[in-house]
Image (cartoon, coloured by chain):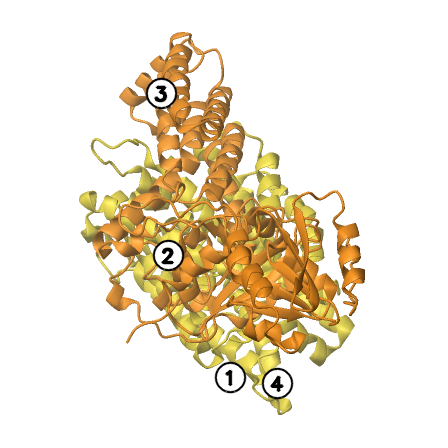
Chain colours: A yellow, B orange
Amino acid sequence: MDKDNYITSYGFIATIIVTVVGIGIFSYPRELAAMVEGDVWLETIIAAFINLILLKLVVAAIRANGFRTITDIIKTKFGSIIGAVILIIMCLPTFFAVSLGMRAFIEVVKMYLLSKTPTEFLIAITIIAGVYIVRGDVKTNIKFNEITLWIMFVPAFIVVLFTLNHTDYTNILPAFRQDIRSYLYALPTAAFAFTGVEIVYIVLPKLSNKKDAFKGIRYSIIFIAIFYIIISITSIAVLTTSETKKLLWPAIDLIRSIEIPGAFVERWDGVVMCLWVIFFFTTFSNGFTYSAYILSDALPLRDIRFSALILAPFIYLVAMYPNNITELYSVIHLIAPFNYVINLLIIPLFLLMLGKSKNNNTRGEEA
Amino acid sequence: MKEVLRKTIYADLEDNYEYLKDLFKNDTDVIFRRFYVGPWEAAIIYIEGLADKNLLNDFVMETLMIFGDRPHKIEEIKDTLLTVTDISEKNELDEAINALLSGDTILMFDGIEVAYIIATRAWPARGVSEPTSESVLRGPKEALVETMRFNTALVRRRLRDSRLKVESTKVGVRSKTDIAIMYIEDIVNQDVLTQVREKLDKIQIDAILDSGYIEQLLEGSRWSIFPQVQSTERPDVVAAALLEGRVALIVDNTPFCVLVPTTLAALFQSPDDYNQRWLYASTIRLVRFIAILLSIILPAIYVSVTSFHTAILPTRLLYAIAASREGVPFPAFIETLIMEVSMALLVEAVLRLPSGLGSTIGIVGGLIIGQAAVTAGIVSPAMIIIVSLTSLTTFITPSYEVISSQRIIRLALIVAASIIGFYGIMLMLIVFLIHLIKLESFGVPYMAPAVNTRSSDLKDLFIRAPLQFFKKRPAYINPQDKIRQK
């Protein structure tokens, strides 16, 4: 494996999965059940398919530009100043998403674990931990993702197993009974649950086996879709559709419903919240790395360690901006469409057109 | 700091002899002897206690003085009269002096510009005994000793392969400590070997008194709490490491060998894992991993649960813990710190004392003071259980260096837990995980094979698969000959 193309297929898949699956899963069953009731699975499958198409576009765009880094491509095509502006526009949605996502997670932590601890303190120390990983560059992030994939999903699936004794899967029926408009309205919500896939821009050029890039993306998206479906269906099966629609974070209530007779622990939500710290942290650290990586080349700071330090106070300010959870979620919902339109539609289309205009070689694809 | 020694050996014996006499004035253990070998004047110089006097008397002095008139030329003496196996010629005096200081004997003749070095190294040495810090249920009971050559022999006995190489170098300006670099020529990771040679060359210290010095001077991240090289006192562990493509450094005067590169997983392994059947070995390994995790987080969980998250416990258990803490004047954090510090003191005291006294201190410290502390209401019985469990699980770790790291992590987690409970524990664990991921040992990821994962390496991580499955050597060390078994 050469020095620049150090990411294995497993590292690539792990990175996409752990970046995408974050705290959004807490509210995902509610948001979709409110619109399409038991047909959450159908909506998730369609959303996964849409994301696959968009990512195919991203892969094609990077391939057309010789698998160079996104910062390199943009700066070559648009020049240093315009390129820098485009790069900053590219990283802004992710930057806002990770900042506000952190606030959302800290609100959950405060509700279930630390009601008296000041939000400011929790946010500050989480940012410090984030800066520590970002300073290790993309390489550290990838290794972190490789390990955390196991730490996250093995216990998560075990947790789901513990809920099986009081599930009623007929709750998801009747299927296909919603109005076609409901399916359409729910589609953006389901599709935006895959936010984070833009991480592909920084990991794809470093992938050792670029030939199988899309295969890796396909596996990742299928894995994420299955996970979302399992959590949503189980939430509905345990809590019923009407309850799932009402609860703020149905996935957490699903865990609260676990009862293991004679167990050492009575309220599992506290324990599982610890596990969810990793779910959140991987999304946060990868999004933070993505923003810092692009910003370091856009400005140009040449070192991700500087850009991480520059971004840190801004993350704090953005995270502290919303006054309450309602305001927070309304802002979060505003950002996702921007991210998709800019990073997964406009940029790849531009790169594809510009890339094809010049006959670029496809460096590393033979590897 | 470096001593400048004369290089030239003159044909005039008197000149060389007087220089050495002056160099070693006031050294009563350096023996000078002038005598005649037939018509030629000769001198012999050795250090008493380091050189084998019997060998010199019986096979050097006797033959030289009795049959000295037989050779026709001085140059013939070496090949006709000296009945010793290991003899070399030195053309530079400083090299001869270094050999003398290592226990060899200098033999010089008047009229030639050469010094003969007779290998007479022999000093009182400890015999091979049982390992004290790495005992096993099944496996050899031999441990390395202080004499480097005995140690290289112990390893070579296990690997009768001409491709096993033993390079020698000296480190330490004053101590000139011999270090043997051992590796298997066609397996070793060449990058690691080059790095080892370069790093050893760069060391400019007055003395290397133990392999611990080398260990610390070779480490890449000196501020890390984790050891980045492995030390062992078992020759079988050295042989196993060499077979994986690693490099062993055997330092003279120390019974601990340094192995590089190392990974965190390697520090948690014991020879028992390979000498016993796979199912038993795998079970033990899983138990060990769980124990290590518990040893790190148990006190922190206690602090979190009693200070922040009381609601997660079943009501009856919560009452039991609350009742046991009734009357304890300190918060859980202080209580835990008191017990952690006491435990660290106890362990250090037991380690430094002779084994007989050590067990007495163990009983006094552990039982009597522990019981008294509970009765006096300073700590709760629940805390004693936590500390006992923590100690038990800590000492399951085969490597003492890692035990020290575990202690620091535990303290950090206790502090984090006392501030923000479970969230603090998780955040601190994440920070340590990131640190471990960033760490490298001679270019090999410290967390391998958990990172840069190759499926073939996973058979020797959490479990130890049957030996038949070990077809390849660990890929993360990047050995040249990758095949271990067909």
Q: Chain of mark 2?
A: B
Secondary element at image label 1:
loop
Q: Nearer the viewer, residue A8 or B256?
A: B256
Q: What residue type is disc 3 on?
A: Ala
Q: What residue type is disc 4 on?
A: Gly
Q: Nearer the viewer, residue A209 or A344?
A: A209
In percent of width and height, residue B292 lies at: 39, 41
| Residue for badge 3 | B382
| Residue for badge 4 | A355
Q: Quadrant of residue B319?
A: top left
Q: Quadrant of residue B450?
A: bottom left
| Residue for badge 1 | A365
In percent of width and height, residue B210 lies at: 57, 47
Answer yes or no: do the residues labelled 2 and 4 have beta carbons within 8 Å? no
Q: Chain of mark 1?
A: A
Of badges 1 and 2, the one in the foreground is: 2
Tell me whether marks 1 and 3 sit on the same chain. no
Q: What residue type is disc 2 on?
A: Asp
Q: Which mark is residue B62?
A: none
Q: What residue type is disc 1 on?
A: Glu
